[in-house]
Structure formats: C-alpha cells, structure tokens
C-alpha cells in the first residue's frame, strides 16, 4: 500500500469547521483581524466573541465585516440593542454546541486568571465553561505580567485541564520593554489550530473504509438481536480520516449519530448487508478499519409474522454470521486491516489471539467494563496490538484522539511497507 504525505498549500482539507475566536483587551487585539483572515483562508468558519475591553482597541464592525456575521459582545445582547430574551440568554450554550474549537487570541493576563478560576462573568468566560471542545489560548501581555508567578500558575492550571497554550514570542513590546509577551505569529497559531483539530494532509489521495455501529438480526417483524455499540468510535475514525484528507467510506449499522461531513455514508442493517457493502468497496481502499460490532449470530429461521407469547419456554436457534474481518485478513494483499476487540476479561490474551486468527495488522482492544472505555462513552482506553509484536497502551482519551492515534500507526505501517 502506498501512503505518502502530499505537499499542499493549505493546512486544512476542504471540510468546513467552526471555531469561536475570543478577542480580549490588549494592544495585540488588532492582530486578531489578520488571524481571522488566515483562518478563513484555511476554510474555517469563524465566530468572533469580543470582551468589553477588546472593544477599546478594535471595533466589532471590523470583525463583522471580515466574517459577515454578528460579533458577540455581550452576554445578553449588545448595549443599546433590543431587550434581552430567552434566545440571547442561552446564546452561549448554542455557540458552545456549534463549534469545534475555542481559540482565545490575544489572551490577556486577566482572561487567563478568569478562565483558570472558573469565573463566568461575560460571554467569553461563560462560553469557555459551557464548551466541551478543545481550547487554545495565545497569551499576549507585558513581559513582567507574563513572568509573574500568578500568571504562570494560572497557565499551569489551564494546561493541567487540557487547554493548549501557544507561548508568546520574545521581542520589542508595545510598552517599550523587550522580552517575552508578544502575541505569537499568526502562522504559529494557525498551525496549533490545525494540530489540535487533527487536520492534516497525510492521507491525501487515500481511501479508508471504516465500519461502525451495531448490526441487527431479525427474530420477527418486531424483534431483533443486536448489541450495545453506539457507533461513536467508528464515526470518530471516519471524522479523523476526513480531517486528514482521506476519502472516508463509512459503512454504518443503525445509529443516531450525525455523519461526519465529507464522509461517504453507506447505511446497512444486518451483518450480511455490512459484509456485502464492505466487500463491494474493499478493493478501492488501501486501509480498512473494522470498528463495527457485527453480530456473531443470527436466528436460523426469522419469523414472517410476530411471534405470540406462550406459556412455556421459547428456544431460539442461531447460526453464525460471516466473519468479515477474517475474510478481509485472508485476502488483504497490500492493504492495512485494523480490527477491534471489545473484551470483558483477558484482554491482552484475547487480542493477541484475534490478531493472529484474523490476519490483521492492528487490533484495537479495550476492556468495556473499565470506566471511560465502555459502550456509548465519549472516551476510550485502548491498547493497540500490532502484527510486528508492538503493544501500545494509550491513556484515557477522547474517541477522536484515539482515532488519530490509530491512523498515526496505520500511516507508520504503510511507510514501513514502502521502505521494504
């Protein structure tokens, strides 16, 4: 399989994503206008949020003209505007649910202190608390303020919570002093946004086939056998693949999840439908990632009419479904095949056995009884078992982060194959 990194003029693939840019009250606020333009050039949808102090340095009209959107300046609507209503009162929640990332640039010492201490006294700080997306802060301030123990303590607290920090540059500052505190270069901030969102070009020109979700096997017209898979892991893999410029084909069992924008979605219901859809598309894929929880058995004789309740026991005869992963492993050729193993005991032993039996290149194994790794969770705790004997234990991560780690190792395996 040929996996090569393509040189491209843009950091981002052509998938529109939404970020909120928080502009706070420092001299560097004027640089946020250039930052907006650079983010837009990279096909990002930018919603600007300004603090009151920021408006002393640059007007909201500037950002409104650049983005074509209303700039959010107040918690309950702009001063002098219409009276606050229910919509304005919960706008911070609506924005939090729409965005993929929150970026604060420039971030003053004051905003860092308020974020670190959970103070929510304006729109931006309330948005921070309401968001469940990655957060990046790009500090800018006087060198003495930057080096003050209180500022550094606040930064350490934010870093401990997972907030990403783009450290300021050193140089001549607006106050006349020289040292650290100047807002990082726009390119550096954009590159950080790219890294945090997992937007790369390393799978450009590649097709990745992903399965996700459960399958359903009919017992009768109103009953079926299924499992507890939510599909979140597979959908996260598809999302990560698209963001890394792959053509992602997502073969999905029934879920309530939104389809990642840019992915080709193929809905299926039964194990046999999934098998047919996968085999039909496998020849076009250089990577196949089987994250679906496919039913191992199905009723031998599903009933045409609803089965009526009786007084005695009901015996249900089951037969095995096709083993899609094993078939792909036997016929993979130069493709990379990744399987999943959701276990409740002897995780490592079972994963190594599955890796060998299915002829897979990677098995992603987890103990579904472990906190943060079970069904319908937004996080996962997995170990990657590679065919070369390596075992990579990952800490608890979001499923999107796990997806990117899997793709990182797929890329490494592909490059190793090219070298050989």
Image (cartoon, rainbow, N blue to C red):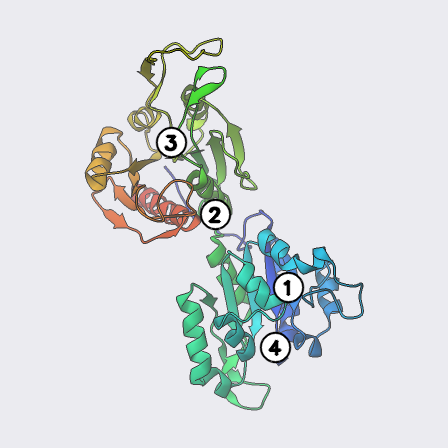
- Residue at image location 30% in from the left, 26% down from the top: 326
**On residue 36, which mark appears?**
1
Q: What distance separates the C-alpha of mark 1 from that of mark 2?
A: 22 Å
Residue 263 place in picture, x, y as percent: 53, 38
- Residue plotted at (68% across, 60% down): 89
Q: Is residue 245 above or below residue 321?
A: below
Disc 2 or 4, which lies upstream in sequence? 4
For numbered disc 3, what is the local secondary structure? Answer: loop
Can I make out residue 283 in this image?
Answer: no
The mark found on residue 209 in the picture is none
* Residue identifier under label 2: 244
Q: Is residue 261 visible?
A: yes
Look at mark 3 in the image and give the residue it sits on: 293
User: In this rendering, is residue 258 above or below 138?
Assistant: above
Disc 3 + disc 4, Cβ < 8 Å: no
| Picture quadrant of residue 323 | top left
Q: Badge 2, how many Cα within 10 Å: few under 14, some, many 20+?
A: many
Give the mark nearest the N terminus, 3 or 2.
Answer: 2
Q: Earlier in the sequence, mark 3 or mark 1?
A: 1
Q: Do the residues labelled 3 and 2 touch (CB within 8 Å)?
A: no
- Spot occupied by residue 70 in the image (x, y as percentages of width and height): 73, 60
Mark 4 touching mark 1, by CB under 8 A? Answer: no
| Residue occupied by mark 4 | 28
Q: What is the C-alpha distance between the residues marked 4 and 1?
A: 13 Å
| Mark 4 surroundings: few (<14), some (14-19) or many (≥20) residues within 10 A | many
Gap between marks 3 and 2 measured at Cα: 25 Å
Q: Residue at (47%, 31%) from the top-left corner?
A: 252
Residue 270: x and y in percent read 44, 22
Q: How far apart are marks 2 and 4 (CA)?
A: 32 Å
């Amino acid at each position: 399989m040929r996996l090569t990194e393509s040189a491209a003029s843009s950091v981002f693939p052509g998938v529109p994503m939404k970020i909120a840019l928080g502009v706070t009250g420092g001299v560097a606020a004027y640089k946020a206008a250039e930052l907006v333009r650079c983010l837009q050039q990279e096909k990002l949808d930018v919603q600007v949020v300004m603090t009151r102090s920021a408006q002393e340095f640059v007007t909201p009209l500037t950002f409104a003209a650049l983005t074509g959107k209303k700039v959010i300046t107040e918690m309950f609507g702009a001063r002098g505007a219409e009276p606050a209503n229910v919509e304005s009162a919960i706008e911070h929640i609506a924005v939090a649910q729409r965005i993929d990332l929150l970026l604060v640039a420039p971030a003053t010492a004051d905003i860092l202190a308020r974020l670190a201490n959970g103070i929510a006294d304006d729109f931006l700080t309330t948005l921070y608390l309401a968001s469940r997306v990655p957060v990046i802060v790009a500090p800018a301030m006087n060198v003495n303020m930057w080096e003050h123990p209180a500022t550094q303590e606040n930064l350490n607290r934010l870093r401990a919570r997972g907030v990403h920090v783009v450290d300021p540059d050193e140089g001549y500052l607006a106050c006349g002093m020289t040292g650290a505190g100047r807002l990082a270069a726009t390119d550096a901030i954009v590159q950080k946004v790219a890294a945090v969102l997992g937007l790369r070009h390393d799978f450009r020109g590649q097709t990745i086939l992903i399965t996700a979700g459960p399958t359903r096997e009919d017992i009768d017209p109103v009953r079926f056998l299924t499992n507890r898979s939510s599909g979140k892991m597979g959908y996260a893999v598809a999302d990560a693949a698209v963001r890394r410029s792959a053509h992602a084909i997502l073969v999905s069992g029934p879920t309530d999840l939104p389809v990642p924008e840019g992915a080709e979605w193929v809905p299926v219901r039964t194990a046999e439908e999934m098998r047919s859809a996968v085999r039909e598309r496998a020849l076009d894929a250089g990577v196949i990632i089987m994250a679906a929880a496919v039913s191992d058995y199905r009723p031998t004789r599903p009933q045409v009419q609803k089965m009526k309740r009786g007084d005695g026991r009901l015996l249900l005869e089951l037969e095995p479904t096709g083993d899609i992963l094993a078939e792909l492993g036997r016929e993979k050729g130069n493709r990379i095949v990744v399987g999943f193993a959701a276990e409740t005991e002897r995780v490592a032993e079972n994963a190594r056995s599955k890796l060998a039996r299915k002829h897979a290149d990677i098995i992603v194994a987890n103990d579904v009884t472990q906190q943060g790794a079970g069904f319908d969770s937004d996080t996962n705790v997995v170990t990657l078992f590679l065919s070369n004997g390596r075992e990579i234990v990952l800490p608890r991560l979001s499923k999107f982060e796990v997806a990117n780690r899997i793709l990182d190792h797929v890329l490494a395996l592909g490059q190793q194959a090219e070298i050989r």
